[in-house]
Amino acid sequence: DAKTTQPNSMESNEEEPVHLPCNHSTISGTDYIHWYRQLPSQGPEYVIHGLTSNVNNRMASLAIAEDRKSSTLILHRATLRDAAVYYCILRAYSGGSNYKLTFGKGTLLTVNP
Amino acid sequence: KAGVTQTPRYLIKTRGQQVTLSCSPISGHRSVSWYQQTPGQGLQFLFEYFSETQRNKGNFPGRFSGRQFSNSRSEMNVSTLELGDSALYLCASSPEAQENYNEQFFGPGTRLTVL
């Protein structure tokens, strides 16, 4: 089964870029990579997703390694509101509506003012 | 548009009891998924319902069940509660089934404590 590995915690300074890594060395060719974040006392919030190519949206960028065994979530300018637990999730499809979700343990991001 | 709502927000039960949690998805969303979050295991997928049918389920015992109504509201039931069932139960909705739509919208969760 696919597995994701993330650092337990990372620290950043406000207005600096943050690179959050995720290793998924056993990823399969059709597995999507999703990132969510969870602020204190809230449910997770969607950040970004990708399959093979790098992706950008208003919240972040997702850089996917060429062999897809790792990915990096990039916050271009961290703010205090970005302090949260960031989850790297693999979605693996096995046909029809059958899929399997594999969650990382999450990275606690601390942003210093 | 109102977000995903979950009731109750907090619940205390004793071992052996059963519990029902409720989730109202965002208006127009037809898929509802349930997750369990614990400090030890992190986030784990329970099941997804779409158009009143269970589409997919995670690796949980049969004590965990759910259903979805015609208005897309969903309930999750846990029977014969165990201490290990203490967790934050999260509900997430999306307009389409998960295999066709990548973004899920999560509710604030129901904190279940089993004594």
Image (cartoon, coloured by chain):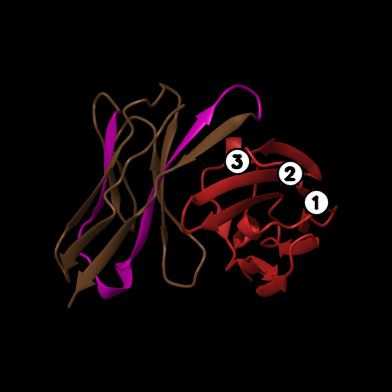
| Circle 1 chain | B
Q: Which mark is residue B50?
A: 2
Q: Identify the amino acid type marked 3.
A: Gln
Q: Is residue A62 magenta?
A: no
Q: Identify the amino acid type marked 1.
A: Gln
| Circle 3 chain | B
Question: Is disc 3 in the same subunit as disc 2?
Answer: yes
Is residue A80 or residue A6 the one in the foreground?
Answer: A6
Chain with colour brown in the figure: A
Residue at mark 1: B68
Residues at marks 1 and 3 touching, judged by CB atoms closer than 8 Å: no
Q: Is residue A77 magenta?
A: yes
Residues at marks 3 and 2 touching, judged by CB atoms closer than 8 Å: no
Residue B103: percent from the left, percent from the top?
52, 49
Question: What separation in Å lies between label 2 and label 1 (alpha carbons)?
Answer: 8 Å
User: Is residue B114 rendered to the left or right of residue A16?
Assistant: right
Q: Is residue B24 above or below residue A65?
A: below
Is residue A74 or residue B42 the one in the foreground?
Answer: B42
Residue B8 appears in the picture as rendered = no
Dot 1: element: strand
User: Is residue A47 rendered to the left or right of residue B1?
Assistant: left
* Colour of chain B as rendered: red
Task: Residue at 84% x, 53% y: name it.
Answer: B69
Residue B59 location, quadrant: top right
Task: Residue at 48% x, 60% y: name it.
Answer: A44
From which residue to which does the magenta span run?
A69-97
Residues at marks 2 and 1 touching, judged by CB atoms closer than 8 Å: yes
Q: Give the number of the mark in front: 1 or 3.
A: 1
Q: Identify the amino acid type marked 2.
A: Phe
Residue A68: percent from the left, percent from the top?
30, 28
